[in-house]
Amino acid sequence: MSPPWPLGAADYRPRDAEHLEAFLETAKRHSDGSPLPGFVEHEFRDFLTCGLLAHGFARLRCTDCAAERLVPFSCKGRGFCPSCGGRRMTECAARLVDEVLPRVPVRQRLLERRGIESGGADLCQADPVVEESPAMAGISSASIQGRIALGPRAGARVWRVGDDPDAPWVLSTAPRHAHLAGFDLHANVAVPAADRTRLEQLCRYLLRPAVAQDRLRLLADGRVALTLKTAWMDGTHHLVFEPLELLEKLAALTPRPRINLVLYHGVLAPHGVVTLCILSSNAWNHEGM
């Protein structure tokens, strides 16, 4: 099915600071003057300068042919920058395969929660995000529910293209797939011990950036369309946002400073007894190859 807009719509290149200022002001108004956390605004402002030569670059010169190239500085953002996220994905996946993961069979287990249960009042009061930034708490809550938190459409669902509200819920579509008590468990992806190339592909998939630049399209009416890689079970294949709504969703993806983006458990936990043995074994295998 073709999207309901001209095929010649331009790729979205979000470098408009005007939308950012409007978004920050809207967030303040919706929280009685309380601004968004500083790290969120910092992430956005750094992204506006990412990859622009005017904000700094490195000059590379080949000593043999004297060819030169200017490489602009990146924002090194950890939230939603496609360029920095792609670079981090590649580097981290290679490190996991070469230095961390042992040569044993690997199985991916993906656990998802379907539906949201209302929590008690004590849970909301104990949430530090609510106390620190009510605006950020509202944005995060709306993002989880697939709704809009700010602007004239506050409380409304995100615009979907192709969704069928009467589509039946499919409990199981593949082997090793279970649905129970609101949880979905997928465990059908496995990698043999000797297939390190496939293992690196799996790591790259798990570490992929939150937003793919080539799936964002700027529509003629100023809205932004996000193409989904795989259609949802209800038939949704595109999500459409107003510019401020898109910034709202990007803000919800911004991690706090000094928070690890990759967590290790079990034998790979930071203080696991087996961790040193695995790393030593990998180092020995690498030297023996």
Image (spheres, rainbow, N blue to C red):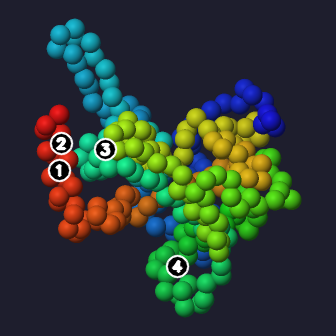
Q: Is residue 36 above or below residue 197?
A: below
Query: Pointers 3 and 1 in contact (CB under 8 A)?
Result: no
Q: Is residue 66 left or right of residue 137?
A: left
Q: Earlier in the sequence, mark 3 or mark 2?
A: 3
State the SS at label 2. Answer: helix
Closer mark to the observer between disc 1 and disc 4 = 1
Res 93 → quadrant: top left
Task: Determine if residue 272 is in view.
Answer: yes
Number of the front mark, 4 or 2 = 2
Circle number at residue 72: none
Q: Residues within 10 Å of mark 2 (few under 14, many from 20)?
A: some
Q: Identity of the amino acid at label 3? A: Val
Question: Between marks 4 and 2, how big is the CA–CA gap?
Answer: 49 Å
On-image quarter of the N terminus: top right
Q: Position of residue 35 (x, y in %)?
A: 52, 69
* Residue type, label 4: Val
Query: Residue beneath label 1, please?
Result: 281
Residue behind mark 4 = 130
Residue at x-position 77% and y-position 40%: 221
Name which of mark 4 and mark 2 comes first in the sequence.
4
Q: 56 or 94: nearer the eye?
A: 94
Q: Is residue 166 left or right of residue 170?
A: right
For disc 2, the marked residue is: 285
Query: What is the spatial separation of the Cα atoms under label 3 and label 1, in whole angstroms?
Result: 13 Å
SS class, disc 4: helix
C-alpha separation, residue under disc 1 versus residue under disc 2? 6 Å
Q: Are marks 1 and 4 in contact (CB under 8 Å)?
A: no
Residue 188: percent from the left, percent from the top? 54, 52
Q: Residue at 55% across / 38% down in the picture?
A: 213
Residue most extreme to the top: 65
